[in-house]
Amino acid sequence: MTQATAELFESHINQDIQVHTPTGAESWRVVSVTRLPSHPFREHPFAAYFAAPIGSTPKQGERSAVFSGGEVVDFFAVPIAATNAVVSYEVIFN
């Protein structure tokens, strides 16, 4: 498993990554990354935002992402919005 870093997610902004969900693999687009203030438990916390296909189940939960370079990152995704086109998720690496 790869260490989750803001740089990894930033290098994939506007690109799709494969996310393994309880119902199968989906292509999620990395929309943006926001760096958060450092604290004693994590030197470089950040939040990543995704757009998932509208057919995805908008439930929070654990997911695994596979990046184009083969990196694998596990995370907990929280849906924050839904439209007729996408479900938006926030993932905080705190």
Image: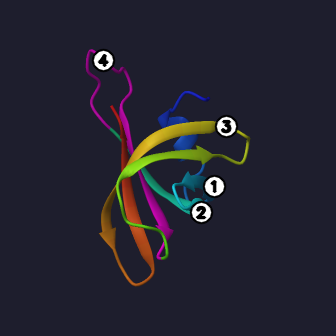
Q: Bounds of the magenta span?
A: 36-54
Q: Do the residues labelled 3 and 4 touch (CB within 8 Å)?
A: no
Task: Look at mark 4 in the image and give the residue it sits on.
Answer: 41
Q: In whole angstroms, how far apart are the C-alphas of marks 1 and 4?
A: 29 Å
Query: Which quarter of the image is occupied by the N terminus?
Result: top right
Q: Seen in the image, is 66 located left or right of residue 83?
A: right
Mark 1 and mark 2 in contact (Cβ < 8 Å)? Answer: yes
Q: Earlier in the sequence, mark 2 or mark 1?
A: 1
Determine contact: label 4, label 2, CB under 8 Å.
Answer: no
Q: Are marks 1 and 3 in contact (CB under 8 Å)?
A: no
In the image as oriented, which residue stretches furthest toward the bottom? 84
68 is within the stretch colored magenta: no
Query: Type of residue at label 4?
Result: Phe
Quick check: 11 left or right of 34?
right
Residue wearing tag 2: 26
Name the residue carrying label 3.
71
Cα–Cα span, label 2 and label 1:
6 Å
Query: Between disc 4 and disc 2, whose residue precedes?
Result: 2
Q: In which quarter of the image is the C terminus?
A: top left
Mark 1: few/some/many CA within 10 Å (<14, 14-19, 20+): some
Q: Which residue is drawn at 45% across and 40% down?
A: 75
